[in-house]
Amino acid sequence: DSGVTQTPKHLITATGQRVTLRCSPRSGDLSVYWYQQSLDQGLQFLIQYYNGEERAKGNILERFSAQQFPDLHSELNLSSLELGDSALYFCASSVLALADTQYFGPGTRLTVL
Amino acid sequence: EDQVTQSPEALRLQEGESSSLNCSYTVSGLRGLFWYRQDPGKGPEFLFTLYSAGEEKEKERLKATLTKKESFLHITAPKPEDSATYLCAVHLNDYKLSFGAGTTVTVRA
């Protein structure tokens, strides 16, 4: 158990809908990262927050957004969902923001029908 | 372009048959190389962090080494419970973590 928690574990929804994924980092970690893992793309970095502020952006679509709250938990919002958004979404956390070891949560499996 | 390449894609081993996985990278400024283990449908589990060429880290049957261009994950006398996908990742200059595609290891009893 890495100490990172994610909810829900599974999410099934329809195209065009909006969902919110939630992540709580390890105690003491200030950085939160979001990743998408699909069969044909591997693990893709989406976005990083450090102590409430956006720090780095990866291949995140405009339909996706995230935020980190004062209690350091983070939410990833996915809107106008498409079939291709079906994937595993992982959250990771680390103490610092730079070149630090990241610890991953168990993931949320999103299925868009 | 910065890139992380893992080989082989898949590795089938007999229990006790030692082997090595390779992770080669082309980044202009390595700020850390990480090894993770991932079981199907689960989150990546952290194994090792390596920061400089010549560094080695060990944990049970696993040993990770780092050179200027590549890293190796050596699995000594593997057991069936070592079956998993092993992921290599590097921190790029802009501090994003870039993952390789992974090596899926299957250990038969």
Image (cartoon, helix red, strand yellow):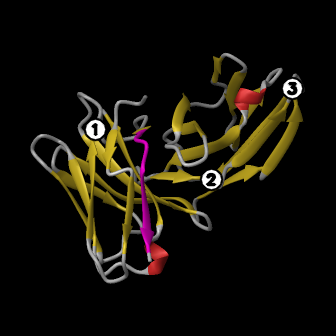
Rendering coords of residue B38 (x, y %) = 59, 41
In the image, A100 versus A20, the foreground residue is A20
Tell me the SS state at disc 3: loop
| Residue B65 located left or right of residue A67 | right
Estimate the x, y position of residue B36 in percent, counting from the top left: 57, 37
- Does residue A81 appear to the left or right of B85 in the view shown? left
Q: Can residue B8 be seen?
A: no
Per the rendering, the mark at residue B100 is 2
Q: Chain of mark 1?
A: A
Instruction: Give the mark nearer the N terminus: 3 vs 2.
Output: 3
How packed mark 3 is, by other alpha carbons closer than 10 Å (few <14, some 14-19, many 20 or more), is some
Q: CA distance from mark 3 to mark 2?
A: 26 Å
Nearest to viewer (mark 3 / mark 2): 3
Q: Is residue A80 above or below residue A50?
A: below
Residue A78 magenta-drawn?
Answer: no
Q: Secondary structure at mark 1?
A: loop
| Chain hosting mark 3 | B
Task: Please tell me whether residue A67 is drawn above or below residue B109 in the rendered image.
Answer: below
Discs 1, 2 touching: Cβ within 8 Å: no
Query: Magenta residues?
Result: A104-112
- The chain letter under disc 2 is B
Q: Return the mark for residue A25.
A: 1
Tell me the quarter of the image containing the C terminus of chain B.
top right
Query: From this viewpoint, is residue B73 visible?
Result: yes
Which dot marks residue B15? 3
Dominant SS of magenta comes to: strand
Disc 2 residue type (three-letter):
Gly
